[in-house]
Image (spheres, rainbow, N blue to C red):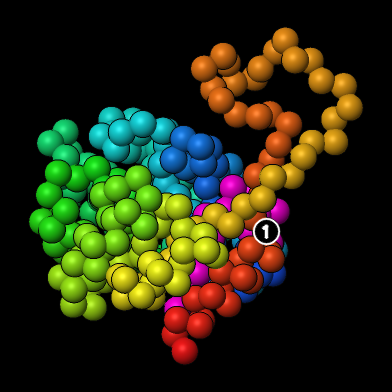
Amino acid sequence: MKLEICANSVSSCLEAQKGGAYRVELCAAIPEGGTTPSYGEIALARELLAIKLNVIIRPRSGDFLYSELEHRTMLKDIEMCRRLGVDGIVIGCLTADGEVDMTRNADLIAAAGDMSITFHRAFDMCHNKYESLESVIKLGCHRLLTSGGKAKAEEGMGLIRRLIEQSKDRIIIMPGSGITEYNIATIAKQTGATEFHLSARMPIYSLMRYRNTEVSMGGKNIEIDEYIFPTTSAERVRKTLENLMQVKG
């Protein structure tokens, strides 16, 4: 039973480690589904972490149909991750028809060398989940992150269980999205999964005293409180792990 924490900063990485997480997935722009973090963020996380560090390779938010320039960007980001000693990368390229892009994903996997490969929730946007699982396995990915084709993993437990049964231990199926200390036991029991992906964040409030309420750096249509910084909580990670271990027992 392992917890992977979706970390939005080095601070979140360290809280995840303190709480007992097995691994972190470091991302930027989590409200947009996660994009590749900066060189500095990755480098410092690698320097300070003793646990496993995975990094998402995603050049932008939106769909998972990438241009040639975006593909080259991802290859460069993977090269950077290898140099920094990252343990694994998290990828997912689709075709215009909602299938796993075997060519582009294979290019990224080849560039990763001996790093661990997770196929992310681009999978949940595929039109045929069972065929897509076989494609992800054929690529040689080590794990698949999925919410079972639903907004939250708790809603997709039925499909997650069927995917685990179909995989026959050829790949790790890791539920993610909406998992908390309160529902992880249910998800574990109902799916049979052994690895879980969650954020376990708490709001950290800005220390700014002067605030210009007339200006938003994110624009009018971006609903983000710029004076709250959601950060992983070691205590929430610890409690989630405790609840998970009770299932194992």
- Residue at point 62%, 52% (across, down): 201
Name the secondary structure under disc 1. loop
Q: Between 186 and 175, which is closer to the camera in this rendering?
A: 186
Is residue 152 left or right of 31 when viewed as pictured? left
The magenta segment: 1-15
Relative to 182, residue 246 above or below: below
Is residue 35 left or right of 106 when viewed as pictured? right
| Residue wearing tag 1 | 233
* Residue 119 visible in the picture: no
Is residue 21 left or right of 137 when viewed as pictured? right
- Residue at point 85%, 36% (across, down): 207
- Measuring from the top left, give residue 101's x and y in whole percent: 18, 46
Q: Amino acid at mark 1?
A: Ser
Q: Between 97 and 89, which is closer to the camera in this rendering?
A: 97
**Which quarter of the figure has residue 104?**
top left
Q: Is residue 3 magenta?
A: yes
> Can you say which quadrant of the picture contains the N terminus?
bottom left
- Residue at point 23%, 78% (across, down): 169
* Mark 1 Cα-neighbour bin, 10 Å: few <14, some 14–19, many ≥20: many
- Measuring from the top left, give residue 128's x and y in whole percent: 12, 49
- Residue at point 33%, 49% (across, down): 121
- Measuring from the top left, give residue 244's x and y in whole percent: 49, 76
Relative to 234, residue 1 above or below: below
**Which quarter of the figure has residue 65?**
top left
Q: Between 101 and 236, which is closer to the camera in this rendering?
A: 236
- Measuring from the top left, give residue 43's x and y in whole percent: 63, 54
Relative to 183, residue 230 above or below: above
* Residue 188 visible in the picture: yes
